[in-house]
Image (spheres, rainbow, N blue to C red):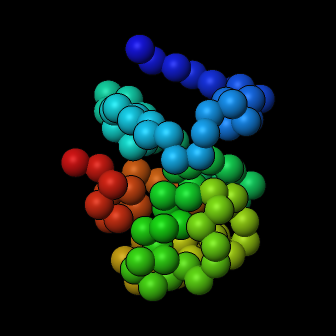
Amino acid sequence: MCLLLSLTSVIELFEMIPLGTKVTIYGHVLGDPGHEPRKLAENDVGGDVQLIQSRLKSAGYYKGICNGKFRSDTARAVKRFQQDHHMAQDGVVSIKIYNKLGLLE
């Protein structure tokens, strides 16, 4: 079964399901493997942003909290990563960055 949930639905489920309940998510972490992940830029929000923040943090580029909110601190980390990897420093997470961070096969 595949579920697409709105934020309201997630909040409702969070209130109904006991903490510690096992949840299994199947599929690629960035969505359908047949489609490229979305480009990320400042003001984007989501699990994909949080994943990028986590990878940048592990690599020593991001010092903030991995909260899934693409703000100026995330943009600065992306630009430093781009600079070190000889990429255009636009602060946008493109397919090249997903690849360099090992998020695509």
- The single residue placed furthest to the left in the displayed view is 105
| Above or below, 101 relative to 79 | above
Image quadrant for the N terminus? top left
Q: Is residue 8 left or right of residue 77?
A: right
Q: State which quadrant residue 35 falls in.
A: top left
Q: Position of residue 59 (x, y in %)?
A: 40, 80
Camera-nearest residue between 70 and 80? 70
Q: State which quadrant residue 31 falls in.
A: top left
| Above or below, 94 relative to 25 | below
Q: Is residue 11 left or right of residue 63?
A: right
Residue at (74% x, 55% y) in the render: 43
Q: Position of residue 79 (x, y in %)?
A: 55, 75
How many numbered marks, from 0 up? 0
User: Is residue 90 visible in this depiction of the protein?
Assistant: no
Q: Position of residue 72 (x, y in %)?
A: 73, 72
| Above or below, 86 relative to 40 | below
User: Is residue 24 visible in this depiction of the protein?
Assistant: yes
Residue at (53% x, 66% y) in the render: 53
Q: Is residue 97 left or right of residue 21?
A: left
Q: State which quadrant residue 67 falls in.
A: bottom right
Q: Position of residue 98 (x, y in %)?
A: 39, 56
Residue at (44% x, 40% y) in the render: 22
